[in-house]
Image (spheres, helix red, strand yellow):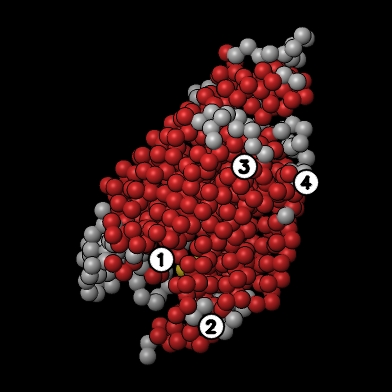
Amino acid sequence: MTAVSRAEEAEKKAVPSRSWPVLLVVVCAQMLIWLDTSVLNVAVTTLADPVDGLGATPAELEWVASSYTLVFAGTLFAGGALADRFGPRNTLLAGLALFGAASGAGAFATDPAWLIVARAVMGAGSALLMPATLSVIVQSTPEEKRTRAIAIWSSSSGLGVAVGPVVGGALLSHFWWGSVFLVNVPIVALCLAGVVAVVPELKGPRRRVLDLPGLALSVLGLGGVVYGIIELGNGQAWCGPHVLLPLLLGGALLALFVAGQRRSPAPSLDLRLFRQPGFTAGSVVLLIAFMALAGHLFYAAFYLQGPRGLSPADAGTVMIAAAIGIVLGSQVSPALSRLLSARWTVAAGVLATAATYVGYLWFDGRTPVLTVAALLWVQGFGMGLVGTPVTAVMMSGVPPHLAGAGSAVNSVTRQVGGTLGVAMTGSILSGVYRKRMADAELPGGASGLTPDAEEQARTSAEAARSLAGSLRLPELAATADRAFLDAMYAATFWTAVLALVGCAVGVVGLRTRNVDRASGGGSTGSGDGDGTGNGPVGLRDRGEPGDRAGHGPPLRGGGGPGHGDVPR
């Protein structure tokens, strides 16, 4: 028996018998991430209110959403490395504690800047949570139950998206805005108790070296790019220092990050994975799909609670339709992939979402709620069709020792796409709204609006509606609604264009073919085993052990430590 076989046998013997209680605890911990994100989609309008919220500007609201996602994406690789080094149980405890503490601090924020910082720390906690939960499941679940356990773990996202809007709407209807963050604290406390009680102490077979310079460059580079996009939509000139300088600096830092990863012995992002056409195309499709989805949900929440006039609770209830669609689409996608192939299943899903974005071009303040809910359901169903087959194609050709790196890229792509999508659509909304309001004549009663009030109304639709209510000027609210709808039409047009680009990338780039496995073994056969209808995307044409590009260490298989790993 080889050393690898003995290690695998020891691992099987070490698997605890309490796998399902462990699964329940880690799924609840994982669901916190999705619950918090979907709750925020309902709370953005309240946060913008100068009386009931923090009076946050559109740019500040974008950073409330983007700071969390940006830090989450930038530190996700570090979370996986820390789980390997210190054990997933310890990393899970640390992530929960950090997430809970930041949630409590954010609930009592007195200004948007405080909330932005708290959200960023919550993102760091989530980055510790996500890889640790999956690692716990893989190591603590018997092999015959592992696939089912991972499927249940994956479904936590749909449950969190479904529950979040309802919980957020109910809290905002009865309590102050901070309750949507404070509610995380008791959930975290229960999860901490569950981890201590049932999750065993687990140690991985290897540990990964942290690439601290690379992580810093990726976070700073993405931050610069997103900051420049937000400032562009906030009225700054594209060639001015507030836009051009952070864009150039962010792009330069990202270029340095990529260059450093090519030479690093312990890279945060293993660039050799992108030599697979299926992996690269899948990453681009996910990036674009989540850009469009996150951007759309950002302005959809404003539409439902603004021109459509729904309460936070009612808006949350309507948005459940998207979560139901995601769950159903995810269930249908494997069978549809076997019937049509992953390529055309993804294309159908992206086209469905693009059609719903186009539908918003006909929305106004009187659009029936059932119509909105129906489009949200179709949109969710389309996204459900996309995620599973794209992930299967991406991971089908990744060798075992790089599976963690491939999974991290998959998660980071979604988070970065969400960040850029919110920045893009938020900038379009803010820019077009300001332009429309600058040309509009604002009603102000007999004495007119004060200069400060007029500036607030021309900057934010939420501020204009608040002023209209306090001054009893329904004409002002109607003017703001018309300007917002024009801004939403512009944002949804470009969101639909973006989705169509993603569809084209999927059709062209996901044309996988059957190749020999990296080990040089037998043929892959028909490729039906992954449920995508496509064979694995090989790292090499003929399974050579080395790197065909002529540089970088070989992509090693077998049981030895992988790239960026050091033996214990």
Q: Decide: few, some or many residues near mark 4? Use Cα within 10 Å; few <14, some 14-19, many ≥20.
A: few
Q: Which mark is residue 315?
A: 3
In the rendered image, residue 519, in percent from the top left (x then y), is placed at 28, 72
Label 2 environment density (alpha carbons within 10 Å; few <14, some 14–19, many ≥20): some
On-image quarter of the N terminus: bottom left
Q: Which is in the foreground here, disc 2 or disc 3?
A: 3
Residue 541 in percent (x, y) is at 22, 62
Q: Are marks 4 and 3 in contact (CB under 8 Å)?
A: no
Q: Which residue is mark 4?
A: 175
How far apart marks 3 and 1 lie (CA) works out to 42 Å
Q: What amino acid type should be assigned to the residue bearing mark 3?
A: Ala
- Which mark sits nearer the N-terminus, 2 or 3? 2
Residue, disc 2: 15
> For the residues marked 4 and 2, what is the alpha-carbon distance in whole angstroms?
45 Å
Helix, strand or loop at mark 2: loop
**Position in image of residue 221 (x %, y %):** 51, 43
